[in-house]
Image (cartoon, helix red, strand yellow):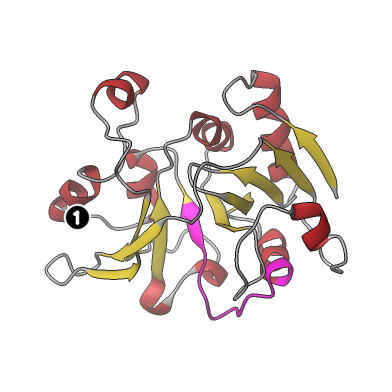
């Protein structure tokens, strides 16, 4: 496991290409999201997905979340009705920098939505009834990486399942048999918890899974 420091507010095209290439090779990469640090892999790589489950000691019955680069990518991987789309757009950030700067409220909590999957990704990340949790991050660095890959990223908090999240990565994970391949150190996160998760498969019966 190696650690590389990258300023997420002053990154280069070379930084993006390097991380995207590592992910393409099936590596598990730790990245700072717009919430906390997470374990990431390309969402089509079954071996990398399996490695994330092993790192976290996570029950395989617990599905994983994916990050997308845009609303178009969202529609590519899950079924979204007009009402669901309207609900999502009221909470997710716009995908243009200008819109983010002028209109998007930073007070809005990063949110993943559970929707019915189109079954284009490995079944290992799906929940019951082919559901998939999807999130559009408000993070230019992640968006550019996903754009470079043109495939969603699996993203899950960098901690052992059932244990409290903290950012003492090296001392916390160095004794494990299975470790991430690369940690991208972007400094301390500004948040202390991950995104909330809302099930909107039935738009008339919305369920908050994690607040």
Helix, strand or loop under label 1: helix
**Res 80 → quadrant:** bottom left
Taking 47 as reference, is 75 above or below it?
above
Number of numbered discs on residues: 1
Q: Residue at x 20, y 44 (%)?
A: 90
Local crowd size for mark 1, using a 10 Å CA cut-off: few (<14), some (14–19), many (≥20): some
Taking 196 as reference, is 109 above or below it?
above
Q: Residue at x 70, y 48 (%)?
A: 29
Is 66 placed left or right of 57 in the picture? left
Magenta span of residues: 54-66
What residue is disc 1 on?
84
**Res 122 → quadrant:** bottom right
Taking 20 as reference, is 134 above or below it?
below
Residue 115 placed where, x, y %? Answer: 32, 63
Q: Quadrant of the C terminus?
A: bottom left
Q: Nearer the viewer, residue 59 or 73?
A: 59
Residue 76 placed where, x, y %? Answer: 37, 48
Residue 18 placed where, x, y %? Answer: 73, 30
Residue 184 placed where, x, y %? Answer: 71, 39
Is residue 59 within the magenta segment?
yes
Is residue 136 within the magenta segment?
no
**Res 102 → quadrant:** top left
Taking 160 as reference, is 11 above or below it?
above
Name the dominant secondary structure of the magenta segment: loop
Q: Residue at x 37, y 78 (%)?
A: 129
Is 29 placed left or right of 124 in the picture? right
Q: Residue at x 73, y 51 (%)?
A: 26
Q: Nearer the viewer, residue 191 or 92?
A: 191
């Amino acid at each position: 496991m190696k650690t590389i420091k990258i300023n997420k507010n002053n990154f280069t095209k070379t930084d993006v290409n390097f991380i995207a290439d590592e992910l393409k090779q099936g590596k598990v990469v730790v990245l700072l999201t717009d919430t906390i640090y997470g374990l990431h892999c390309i969402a089509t790589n079954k071996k990398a997905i399996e490695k994330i489950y092993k790192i976290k000691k996570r029950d395989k019955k617990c599905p994983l979340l994916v990050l997308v680069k845009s609303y178009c990518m969202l529609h590519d991987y899950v079924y979204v009705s007009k009402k669901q789309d309207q609900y999502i757009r009221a909470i997710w950030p716009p995908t243009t920098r200008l819109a983010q700067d002028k209109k998007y409220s930073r007070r809005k909590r990063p949110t993943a939505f559970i929707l019915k999957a189109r079954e284009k990704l490995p079944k290992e990340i799906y929940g019951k009834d082919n559901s998939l949790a999807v999130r559009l991050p408000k993070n230019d660095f992640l968006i550019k990486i996903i754009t470079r890959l043109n495939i969603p990223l699996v993203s899950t908090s960098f901690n052992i399942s059932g244990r409290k999240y903290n950012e003492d990565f090296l001392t916390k994970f160095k004794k494990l048999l299975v470790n991430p391949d690369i940690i991208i150190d972007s400094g301390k996160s500004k948040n202390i918890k991950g995104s909330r998760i809302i099930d909107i498969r039935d738009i008339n019966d919305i369920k908050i899974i994690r607040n």
